Amino acid sequence: MQCNQEDNQAGCNCTYEPCPRKGICCQCIQYHIKMRQLPACAFPDDAEKNYDRSFEHFARLVGEKRV
């Protein structure tokens, strides 16, 4: 399978600019899962900006019906 990095970046809401994984979803997901996190695209834009991508933060957002 070929990565469509350019297409993927169009839908990527990650605001961490020096990230080398932008648009390379398979690497992004692997990285964040190892860190007990979800990638930026799992979060609403305003919640993503604080860089708390933890499972716990995601669960709080689900509880608040924001995700």
Image (tube, rainbow, N blue to C red):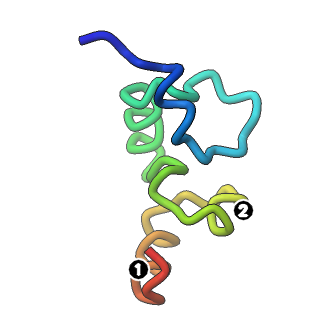
Quadrant in the picture for the N terminus? top left
Q: Amino acid at mark 2?
A: Asn
Quadrant in the picture for the C terminus? bottom left
Which residue is rendered at x = 40% and y = 37% of the image? 29
Q: Return the mark for residue 62.
A: 1
The residue that disc 2 covers is 50
Residue 63's spot in the image, x, y percent?
41, 87
- Mark 2 touches mark 1? (CB < 8 Å): no
Q: Amino acid at mark 1?
A: Val
Q: Earlier in the sequence, mark 2 or mark 1?
A: 2
Mark 1 Cα within 10 Å, few/some/many (few <14, many 20+)?
few
In the rendered image, the vertical position of residue 63 relative to residue 53, given as above or below: below
| Distance of label 2 from label 1 (alpha carbons) | 17 Å
Element class at badge 2: loop
Residue 6's spot in the image, x, y percent?
53, 20
Residue 4's spot in the image, x, y percent?
41, 18
In the rendered image, the vertical position of residue 38 relative to residue 46, given as above or below: above
Residue 24: in sight, yes or no?
yes
Which residue is rendered at x = 45% and y = 57% of the image? 42
